[in-house]
Amino acid sequence: MVNRAIAASSPVGVVDLGSNSVLLLVLGCDGHVLYDGARITRLGQGVFESGALAPAAMMRTRQVVREYSERARALGARQVVGVGTEALRLARNGAHFLETLCHDGLLDAADLLTGEQEARLAVEATRRSPAGAGEHPIVIDVGGGSTELAWLDPRGRTRAVSLPIGSVRLTEMHLRSDPVPAKEMAALREAVAQATQTLEPPAGTIVAVAGTATTLAALELRLDPYDPEAVEGYVVNAVTLRRWIDRLAGLSLEARRQLPGLEPARADVIVAGLVILEGALGQTGVDHFSVSGRGVRYGIVLRLLEV
């Protein structure tokens, strides 16, 4: 996907085009973080029903990718690569959208990841983070369109599962009112239970990555503004997770947007995201997890730089 020799001699930028958020990570060749940011563009808006990326969603995302590309190059990145996840995998125009970003010079290269690739990259990054602490964690990555779980087996091989449930996807399917009525919450929980019922991860340390988990930690810590260092490695238990689900489901959308630690653009999908996290956690048999903001983009950059 990228010339490794070029990447190793200069900073590298990776743009992760998720179903809900677009993220940019720029790492120096020594592994030092030069920039790490996220913007919610809701690229997956409507795609799980229509099967195509909406023009407005593509325009929002394209503008953010342009800004990110300019920022990465200003920081010295000679390569800016992009990766697409569930919304782009499902959309019939997803691959074409990635191709246009490269054709127009916003990205130097782009790749459409499989769900298993997403999971493997997340576990690779998490093992080197404070949350992973060098152990062999089970990684739960709740995205906008899908949820990935990954872990290392006793032989050191990565095992990965991708589930077709995500915060945007299930919100669009099941949640139409705020506060969330009991009937809609029941339908949401049933969808999560159906998707996670066959999961059989081994016993181990749990690390939850990406926006749903980091938002939960930020809510608990009442972070305003958001501080990535404060949430990295923060431990949350199942009781706290359930408390926040119940509280957020009982609030209006506008009331959620006012909460310290909750990015307003994520307020409409956070309930679904947390219910998915709860369901996945329940299948592990563990009642707590560490939070990490180091997801797929870190796995890609670390692999390219081999740091």
Image: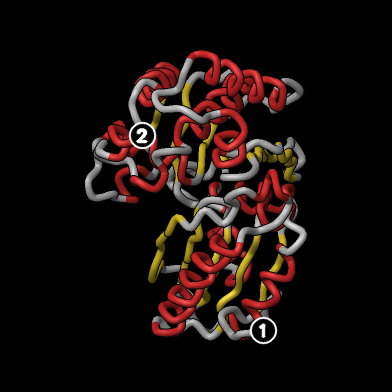
Q: Tell me the residue at 53%/51% (across/down).
A: 20
Q: Nearer the viewer, residue 66 or 73?
A: 66
Q: Nearer the viewer, residue 228 or 146?
A: 146
> Which numbered tag is attached to residue 161?
none
The picture places residue 233, in percent across and down from the top left corner, at: 40, 40
Mark number displayed over residue 103: 1
Q: Tell how many labels.
A: 2
Residue located beneath label 2 in the image: 253
In percent of width and height, residue 65 lies at: 51, 72
Horizontally, residue 136 falls left or right of residue 163, namely left
Residue 225 visible from this viewpoint: yes
In 3D space, how far apart are the residues under numbered discs 2 and 1 (Cα atoms)? 39 Å
Element under disc 2: helix
Indicate whether 188 appears above or below 41: above
| 210 is higher (above) or lower (below) than 284 | below
Position in image of residue 200 (x %, y %): 73, 24
Binning the other alpha carbons within 10 Å of mark 2 as few (below 14), some (14 to 19) or many (20 upward) gives some
Kind of element beneath mark 1:
helix
If you read the primary sequence from the N terminus, does the residue marked by circle 2 or circle 1 appear first? Answer: 1
Front tag of 2 and 1: 2
With respect to residue 81, does 116 lie above or below? Answer: above
Going by the numbered disc 1, the residue's amino acid type is: His
Quadrant in the picture for residue 4: bottom right
Question: What residue is shown at x 71% (from left), y 74% (from top)?
Answer: 1
In this picture, residue 169 sits left or right of residue 37:
right
Q: Is residue 299 above or below residue 259?
A: below
The structure residue drawn at horizontal position 69% and vertical position 25%, both measured from the top left corner, is 196
Asked if the residue at tag 1 contacts the one at tag 2, i.e. Cβ–Cβ closer than 8 Å, the answer is no
Q: Is 239 placed left or right of 141 in the picture?
A: left
